[in-house]
Structures are given as C-alpha cells and as structure tokens.
Image: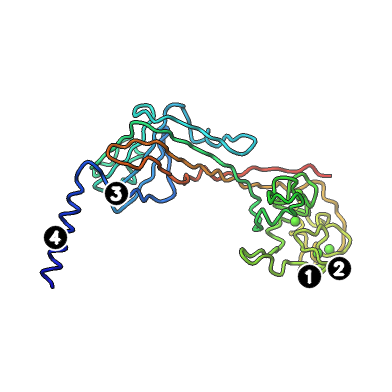
Amino acid sequence: MRYLSMLACLGLLILSSCDDGDIITVEFDFDDTFEACGDLVFFNIKEDPYESLSLKITDPVITLDSLYVVDSTFTKIITATIDGTKNTFNYRSYNANPENFFCNDVPPSDVTVTNDLASSGGIATITTTLIEDDNDGIPAEVEDKNLDGDNDPSTMPTDTDGDGIPDYLDDDDDGDNVKTASESPNYVVGVGFVDSLDTDGDGIPDYLDPDDDGDGILTRDEESKSQDQNPTNDITFSTLGADYLTAEVDSLVQATKYREHTIKQTYEVKIELTNIQLPGVSQDYFDLGILDDSSTNKNRYVTPEFP
Ligand SMILES: [Ca+2]
Ligand SMILES: [Ca+2]
Ligand SMILES: [Ca+2]
Ligand SMILES: [Ca+2]
C-alpha cells in the first residue's frame, strides 16, 4: 500500500512539473485592497507566494488628489490605455516579501524579482465614488422618511431641523446644538433603535427633540453658564446635571449660532483592468480592488445659517 501511494505521489509530481510549458498557471487570488504611491503606481501585493499586480499610469498625468475631484453625481471615471511604456501593468513574483518594493526610490536589495510579466495591451478604469455621512451612529437609510419611495436618502431628504443639511448628513439632527451621537439614539445594527433616550417622555427621542426636558425652553437656549453653542456644559446644580436635561431649571439665554457640523467623506477608488495581455496568461480581466490609503478619508465642515 505504501509503495502504491508513493507511486501515486510520484505521478502527481511529474504531472505538476509538466506544467512548465507555455501556459503559466497563476492563481491571482489577491486580496480586495490595493495601495498607491509616487507618480502614480497602484499595487496589490500578496504573500505565500510573494507576488504583485501593479499599474503605473503617466498618461494622462494623474495624482492621488485628482482622483478625489468628483462631479455632481459624486463620481469620477478615468480610463488609461495600457501600452507597455507610458502605462504599464505587470505581474511579478519575488523571492522575498515585496512590501517595500514599490514606494522606495531604491528597491530593497534583498528582494529579487523572479518573474516579471508585462501586459502588451488593455484598458485600466479607475472609478472614484464619494460617500458622505454624518457619522452619528444611525445609518443614512434610517435617517430618511423615504417620502419619495426611492430608498435614496439624498433625494427629497428629511431635514428635521430645517437647517438645510439633511438628517443623513446632519450630526445634530434637531438643531439643538447637542450632537446626535451625544443624545443616545442607541441604534443597534441589525436590530434598530433600542430604548432611545427620551428625557421628557413625550415620545420624541432626545436626538430629534429640540426641547429635551420639555420645560418650554429650547435646549440650545439653556446656555446660562457659558454661551458657546454647547448646552452640555451649562450646569446650575451638579446634583441635577445639565440644565437642558433638567425641567426644574429653565433659565433662558438664547443661542445665537449653530455649532459647526462635520460631514465625513469617504472616497472609494476602484480599479478594473480589461483586455489585459500578459504573456502566457489566459486571464484578461483583473480587479485590483479598493484603494487602501488614509487620504481616502476626509471631512468637510459646515456651519448652517442660524434662523
Ligand atoms: Ca438638518
Ligand atoms: Ca441634537
Ligand atoms: Ca423627548
Ligand atoms: Ca431645563
């Protein structure tokens, strides 16, 4: 039995070594993110074995920042023709981890390229999509009453406080100068709202209630200690807590401004390659995945006009 299995094993070895013909077998099971550096190289590397897919584009001239300039539909699409000189797409394998291979002027001396295949043609398509969110813990689709029935929070959007910033982008939905995330909406993914804080028990949760304690003074106007568009630090009695959550305290000091709002921006940059021609490789479509770079996360700041 042992002799037979050794024979079978030998057979497998011969079969796999027979693969050394014209067709190169590469699995291309890269992960779903890629990186970028310099002017402008995109690369997806993997270990075990050490391999990379990389795209260099010099025509048109693009920078990472230029990928984030989107149109009114929050998208940008750039295409580049792979010609093997100005724009190149390569599959490479290495003897060691190529993690420092791409972003250094002098590649590490201990990393040797053991195979390098360059595509003689193809099209690279870079698609950027901007996604904005208020980062308040409540998903955008939940922050829209969907009155137009299209499940798109950006069309005919719900704007509870009427400040011009729709709820799904508004980090202070009720305009009371206390951020939604600080008003305990308690949204649990997959479950929904769980015991959202409703201080005055009027059925309107604090994050949508402009008068949280129901004392007749708007929360944003309970600023008797420091007039800084922040009612959370106005505390008359430390035993009772903040005035805006205490119906017994109703001193009126009117707010004059809204707080600055922060809108989180995420740029999703995706690269696909079509009609690729790597020598001896039949696969002609490659998906590099999504760009993993800190520059894809930005903020924009808006202070709405006070009524
Ligand atoms: Ca609003
Ligand atoms: Ca609020
Ligand atoms: Ca309430
Ligand atoms: Ca109060």
* Marks 1 and 4, the one that precedes in the sequence: 4
Q: For mark 4, does the 10 Å Cα neighbourhood hold few (<14), some (14 to 19), or many (20 or more) residues?
A: few
Q: Could you tell me if the residues under marks 2 and 1 are in contact, i.e. CB atoms within 8 Å? A: yes
Q: Which residue is mark 1?
A: 240
Badge 3 vs badge 4, beta-carbon distance below 8 Å:
no
Using the image, tell me which numbered label, if any, was put on residue 248.
Answer: 2
Alpha carbons under labels 1 and 4: distance apart = 81 Å
**Sequence order check, earlier mark of 1 and 3:** 3
- Residue under label 4, please give it: 10
Q: Which of the 4 image quarters holds residue 201?
A: bottom right
Name the secondary structure under disc 1: loop
Mark 3: which amino acid?
Tyr
Query: Which tag, 2 or 1, sits closer to the chain's start?
Result: 1
Q: Nearer the viewer, mark 1 or mark 3?
A: 3
Identify which residue is drawn at 32% across, 50% down: 27
Q: Which residue is mark 3?
A: 50
